Amino acid sequence: MKYNIVGRKVNLRDNFKERVYKKLGKFEKIYSEDAEATVTVTLEKNRQTVEVTIRDGVMVYRAESTALEMNDALDAVVDILGGQIRKNKTKLSKKIKAESLEQYFLEDAGAAEEAMRDEEYDVVRTKTFTVKPLSVEEAILQMNLIGHEFFMFLNSATSKINVVYKRKGNTYGLLEPEF
């Protein structure tokens, strides 16, 4: 796994970087060699936010935590990522042997058994609507008007289907397809 550690408004010490390698290193057997882990540490008003994004092919795992100390935030992020991996264990077991996962999560054996049950994804509603060419700003305005957390639209600048969504802190995100 490749690591990219970024500090925003904070200088990262070598012992924190070593801690990142150690904590995320336990996930290395789960992901391929091409997997990329991006760790971003941000300091805002004496609170430190650690965000970890692991990309492996089409699989993306992301977790974020804020604490007074960056080490505490890192521990919380690793716990969240472990939970996501346990939840998706049956999907991941196609890539690796199941017993290699078990050694990392023995303390949560009950949760692992629960996650192993096959989940069925039931689509309970299908909604169709007319897609109109809009700018990103118009799409955000439309999303806010209808009170949704996301909005799909045809981007008038790129002629591709895009999705705008609300993020934490009253910010917005844009999803664009890449082929």
Image (spheres, helix red, strand yellow):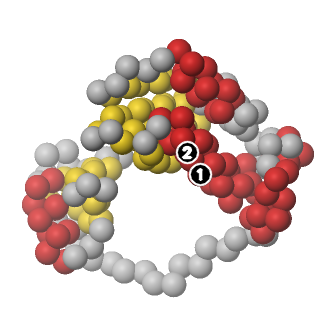
Quick one: which residue is furthest to the bottom in this view?
124
Q: Is residue 101 above or below residue 71?
A: below
Q: Determine whether, in the image, residue 172 is placed left or right of residue 42.
A: left
Residue 79 visible in the picture = yes
Under mark 2, the amino acid is Val
SS type, badge 2 = helix
Q: Quadrant of the N terminus?
A: top right
Q: Quadrant of the C terminus?
A: top left
Tell me the quarter of the picture where residue 2 sits: top right
Q: Which residue is mark 1?
A: 80
Q: Is residue 140 above or below residue 45?
A: below
Q: Which residue is found at the position 34% from the left and 25% from the top?
A: 10
Q: Which residue is found at the position 59% from the left and 36% from the top?
A: 56
Task: Measure how far apart labels 1 and 2 are at the Cα level.
Answer: 5 Å
Q: Determine whether, in the image, residue 110 is placed left or right of residue 167.
A: right
Residue 170 drawn at (x, y percent): 22, 57
Q: Which residue is found at the position 76% from the left and 64% from the top?
A: 111
Q: Determine whether, in the image, residue 137 is placed left or right of residue 97.
A: left
Residue 27 drawn at (x, y percent): 70, 36
The residue carrying pointer 1 sits among few (fewer than 14), some (14 to 19) or many (20 or more) residues within 10 Å by Cα, namely some
The residue carrying pointer 2 sits among few (fewer than 14), some (14 to 19) or many (20 or more) residues within 10 Å by Cα, namely many
Q: Are marks 1 and 2 in contact (CB under 8 Å)?
A: yes
Which circle marks residue 77 in the picture? Answer: 2
Under mark 1, the amino acid is Ile
Residue 53 drawn at (x, y percent): 50, 39
Residue 178 visible in the picture = no
Q: Is residue 39 above or below residue 134?
A: above
SS type, badge 1 = helix
Which circle marks residue 127 in the picture? Answer: none
Q: Which residue is found at the position 26% from the left and 65% from the top?
A: 151
Residue 127 drawn at (x, y percent): 37, 80
The foreground one among 84 and 31 is 84
